[in-house]
Image: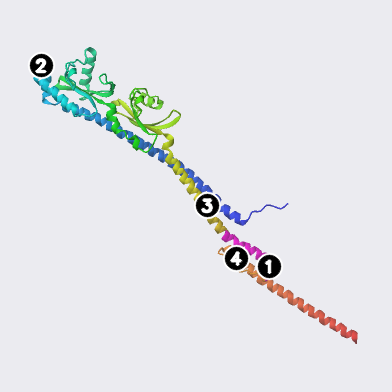
């Protein structure tokens, strides 16, 4: 039975290709995993950064609103009127001031001045003036909350009984030393103040959008206005809300969840005094598009690398094997006694040169040996011929 053999050419190719393919594929896998983690971390940071900046910007609008309330309350006529609430002329002046002041504000439901007993003293709407806003326990609770606050009592986001819209409701006590004279009440529209800050459409992700919920999960802001006022069904977000106030709760973070069968990835920001949580979300599949693109680049690069080294290995192995094949033919010719065979085989490989030189030496030695045999045969032939002539001469005699 003929044994199986493998050519030296194939051995050389395997010696180059096997390590090349193994290393290329291993590096591709390692680089893919590293790149995936880096891209995921980078995307997480970008999403958190975006929603944090938006949340801080909205918190700043609240802080700005507090400053606006303070400016309104510091008007000398306002303070004088709180001290002299029976002064009709001063009351008309403060009412006009209130209307003009409110007219310069954007995104506000209203701002008004009330006595400490919550009787409205000035309001952008004339018909509201004189109305008592709270009484009894509700009034006492409001008064205590204002006095215990750091300048402004932020109730949080509520559904306004006046407009029916979601507003950030705030109250600021007006003090004369330690004695409360009255307070300023104000409300800013949630949608009107958040919408200019929402740039999700410009992020570059088609599935991306921003929404805001209160600390109970009620949706306060959403691109789909039909969802506003409803409860969030995002279990991952509801878990974040449930942990608000805990020692391990975070102001920012990321969550993953499934919505309508689609895997989502989101970043969140917990707003001022934990009144709300802003969420920026997008399809996980779209977020990982860059990762897949990089994977394709790596696979193509690995393929090109393998093809390049395969071609290089083929060429080099050819350069090595071709002289060896010629030497095999030379040795076969010499084994048959052909001393005219050309042993001048060009090669850059030291071992092949040694074989060539040995074949050349063998050719010379074989030629000398064959020459000696040929000469000996010629001498023998001559001797035989001479011996035959002697016998013939003797026979004639």
> Looking at the image, is mark 4 or mark 1 earlier in the sequence?
1
Instruction: Give the labeled residue for mark 1.
Output: 334
Q: Residues within 10 Å of mark 3 (few under 14, many from 20)?
A: some
Looking at the rendering, the stretch of residues picked out in magenta corresponds to 318-339
Q: Main secondary structure of the magenta part?
A: helix
Residue 313 percent across, percent down from the top left: 54, 56
Instruction: Give the labeled residue for mark 3.
Output: 307
From the viewer's perspective, is the residue at label 4 or at label 1 nearer? 1
- 76 versus 119 height, above or below: below
Nearer-the-camera pick, 187 or 40: 187
> Looking at the image, is mark 2 or mark 1 earlier in the sequence?
2
> Looking at the image, is mark 2 or mark 3 earlier in the sequence?
2
Q: Residues within 10 Å of mark 4 (few under 14, many from 20)?
A: few
The residues bearing labels 2 and 3 have C-alpha atoms spaced at a distance of 95 Å
The residues bearing labels 1 and 3 have C-alpha atoms spaced at a distance of 40 Å
What's the residue at 59%, 65% (across, down)?
A: 353
Instruction: Give the labeled residue for mark 2.
Output: 86
Q: Residues within 10 Å of mark 2 (few under 14, many from 20)?
A: few
- 88 versus 351 height, above or below: above
The secondary element bearing badge 3 is classed as helix
Residue 27 percent across, percent down from the top left: 48, 46
Residue 145 percent across, percent down from the top left: 23, 19
């Amino acid at each position: 039975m003929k044994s199986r053999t493998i050519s030296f050419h194939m051995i050389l190719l395997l010696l180059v290709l096997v390590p090349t393919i193994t290393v290329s594929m291993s590096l591709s896998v390692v680089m893919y995993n590293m790149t995936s983690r880096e891209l995921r971390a980078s995307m997480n940071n970008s999403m958190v950064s975006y929603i944090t900046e938006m949340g801080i910007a909205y918190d700043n609008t609240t802080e700005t609103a507090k400053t606006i309330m303070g400016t309104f309350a510091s008007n000398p006529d306002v303070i004088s009127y709180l001290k002299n609430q029976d002064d009709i002329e001063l009351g008309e002046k403060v009412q006009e001031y209130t209307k003009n002041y409110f007219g310069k504000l954007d995104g506000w439901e209203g701002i008004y001045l009330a006595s400490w007993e919550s009787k409205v003293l000035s309001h952008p709407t004339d018909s509201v003036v004189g109305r008592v806003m709270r009484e009894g326990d509700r009034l006492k609770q409001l008064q205590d909350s204002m006095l215990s606050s750091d300048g402004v009592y932020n109730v949080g986001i509520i559904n306004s009984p006046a407009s029916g819209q979601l507003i950030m409701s705030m109250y600021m006590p007006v003090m004369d030393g330690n004695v409360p004279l009255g307070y300023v009440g104000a409300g800013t529209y949630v949608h009107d103040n958040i919408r200019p800050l929402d740039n999700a459409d410009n992020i570059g992700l088609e599935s991306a959008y921003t929404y805001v919920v209160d600390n109970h999960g009620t949706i306060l802001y959403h691109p789909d206005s039909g969802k506003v006022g409803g409860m969030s069904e995002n279990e991952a977000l509801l878990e974040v809300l449930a942990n608000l106030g805990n020692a391990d709760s975070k102001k920012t973070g990321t969550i993953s969840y499934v919505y309508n069968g689609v895997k989502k990835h989101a970043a969140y920001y917990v707003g001022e005094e934990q009144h709300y949580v802003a969420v920026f979300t997008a399809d996980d599949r779209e977020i990982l598009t860059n990762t897949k693109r990089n994977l394709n680049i790596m696979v193509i690069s690995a393929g090109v690398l393998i093809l390049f080294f395969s071609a290089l290995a083929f060429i080099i192995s050819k350069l090595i094997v071709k002289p060896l094949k010629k030497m095999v033919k030379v040795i076969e010719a010499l084994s048959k006694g052909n001393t005219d065979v050309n042993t001048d085989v060009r090669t850059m490989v030291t071992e092949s040169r040694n074989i060539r030189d040995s074949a050349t030496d063998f050719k010379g030695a074989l030629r000398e040996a064959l020459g000696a045999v040929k000469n000996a045969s010629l001498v023998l032939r001559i001797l035989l011929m001479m011996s035959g002539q002697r016998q013939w001469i003797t026979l004639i005699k």
